Image (cartoon, rainbow, N blue to C red):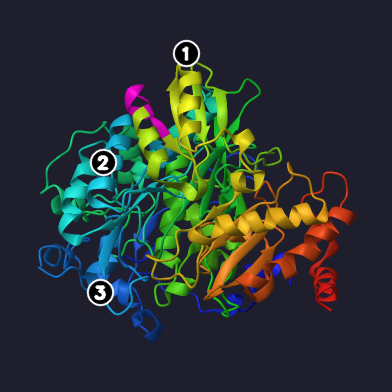
Amino acid sequence: MSAAGFRGGAAAQLPRSRMLGRPLRVAPPAATSAGGGGPSSASIRAVSAPLKKDASEVKRSKVEIIKEKSNFLRYPLNEELVSEAPNINDSAVQLIKFHGSYQQTDRDVRGQKNYSFMLRTKNPCGKVPNQLYLAMDTLADEFGIGTLRLTTRQTFQLHGVLKKNLKTVISTVIKNMGSSLGACGDLNRNVLAPAAPYVRKDILFAQETAENIAALLTPQSGAYYDLWVDGEKIMSAEEPPEVTKARNDNTYGTNFPDSPEPIYGTQYLPRKFKIAVTVAGDNSVDILTNDIGVVVVSDSQGEPVGFNIYVGGGMGRTHRVETTFPRLADPLGYVPKEDILCAIKAIVVTQRENGRRDDRRYSRMKYLIDRWGIDKFRAEVEKYYGKKFEDFRPLPEWQFNSYLGWQEQGDGKLFYGVHVDNGRVGGQAKKTLREIIEKYNLDASITPNQNLVLCGIDQAWKDPITAALAQSGLLEPKDVDPLNLTAMACPALPLCPLAQTEAERGILPILKRIRAVFDKVGIKDHESVVVRITGCPNGCARPYMAEVGFVGDGPNSYQIWLGGTPNQSTLAESFMNKVKLQDIEKVLEPLFSYWNSARQEGESFGSFTHRMGFDKLKVVVNAAAV
């Protein structure tokens, strides 16, 4: 199947969802000048319109009804949290996601339900103030399982929290410059941006924009603070006026004017929503996998002037349901920098009003765009934006930046990117990181590749920090196998309820086996491929962008996906199903041997698989099995 085959197929025939909340009828814009020039000044207005009732409108998923009855994410979670039971009921399970937590059980324990909760923080750009890092480290020891998990969306996950300790844990996060509000649930999740603390105009502007988008789309009802800090107003930085203005602006009928949630209403979004911001050429954020990808465009003097916007990316799918698929984002258009918040809001509202709410498998915005096509989607967004999108500005080729090792910030200080296998911070490494961050009063940031950046380091601290990290097992990148440097895995078993097999606990042995195959077929030590592993098809570690992706499809069994590229700009394709863990060499050895003997100079494994085609590659694998 071609890569395009994962973008549509039978999904194109799925019925269009109906709008929820206050329906809008948008008057057509006045005529605009031809061509792809500047934005239109046409007046576009939206007015209330009665919603026709039919059978398809009545049908809604159970989660939609739970949200509607929740009093903006309060009920019945507020009652369930104070019960004596170690768990919460199904409705509360859905609501607590919006507050940043998932109910889990330890699947290694048979015959009983050992309930606990995973807490996920929300850290726009991956930024972690010194105070918050130290608080999270302490919480992991006192209320978690003694480890911190760095995620693929630049956040922390804290596993193993008991229900009785949730309020203590979340209130501690809030009081230490953190939040978990909107880290999960049917709304905008953590906004990604380059994690490097470069003192560069475009990087700083990308990070500022990511923080503003995160603020714009944060729930406003107050339920989060009511539940976790008894309604206390915690001191925080004042919201930028442009964020408040964009949220309250209802010129084009985007808002619920009398609602505690002016953008989200009672129903919030149909499904999770993911946004990333980056600068031209920097694909440290897997930009094309997001619902919205925002790229800073600078002029010839390096001044940021606007943004290219991509829409419709997403990784999740369901095994053996061909109408679900991973998808790369499409170019939507360009906006000047002063319009970015209004443009983002218009896209979110288009998904809010048109995304499917009857079947959650098809609720992500990628399916709306796949059904409509990008031109219809753009036209609908423009009604809420009030302008025409300008033509995309040219961009350089994407590059993956890990930000590992020692680098200059640009202000006389250094930063150090620490490679953390699987993002799991524990043991002596955890202790040493805390000591360094505490001793030198460092801030940190989390990368989308599950690593940690230590920021603002004086030159004189470089050697003692390097030595301390190495003694704890956190080696410099030059001393780590290149396979490990780009590999990612989701947590999967034992705590994730969706996992079908191992991911985090299995990836390091798999990487060693791949390196052994490399040695056997003559691939050199410095060479590598991008390997990503997930325990289920939801794709949290973005395996569909890997050169070799392992997607759990049963106990000790994986789908193998091939064809992503090192710069994460190409979608992989499903190569083989139901490959048992013990048999992966039977598939990979002939493929890597063929790549080593037939590749062009500098050709990555992913590009090689595309050039050769899967039919040829399957012949190679089958011939080796004879």
What range is drawn magenta here? 436-444
Task: Give the percent coordinates (x, y) of residue 166.
Answer: 20, 55
Task: Give the percent coordinates (x, y) of residue 197.
Answer: 48, 27
Residue shown at the point (69%, 39%) measured from the top left: 394
Query: For mark 1, what is the residue?
Result: 460
Task: Identify residue type, mark 1.
Answer: Ala
Query: For mark 2, what is the residue?
Result: 138
Residue that extends furthest to the front in the rendered view of this protein? 471
The verdict on residue 124 being magenta is no
Residue nearest the viewer, comparing 521 with 562? 521
Image quarter where the N terminus lies is: bottom right
Task: Identify residue type, mark 3.
Answer: Asp
Residue that extends furthest to the bottom in the rendered view of this protein? 55
**Judging from the image, what secondary structure is the residue with disc 2 in?**
helix
Q: Residues within 10 Å of mark 3 (few under 14, many from 20)?
A: few
CA–CA distance between discs 1 and 3?
Answer: 54 Å
Q: Is residue 150 left or right of residue 577?
A: left
Q: Which comes sooner in the sequence, label 2 or label 3?
A: 3
**Judging from the image, what secondary structure is the residue with disc 1 in?**
helix
Residue nearest the viewer, comparing 514 with 14? 514
Task: Identify residue type, mark 2.
Answer: Thr
Task: Give the percent coordinates (x, y) of residue 161.
Answer: 25, 56
**Judging from the image, what secondary structure is the residue with disc 3 in?**
helix
Residue nearest the viewer, comparing 41 with 614? 614
**Label total for image:** 3
CA–CA distance between discs 1 and 2?
Answer: 28 Å
Query: For mark 3, what is the residue?
Result: 90
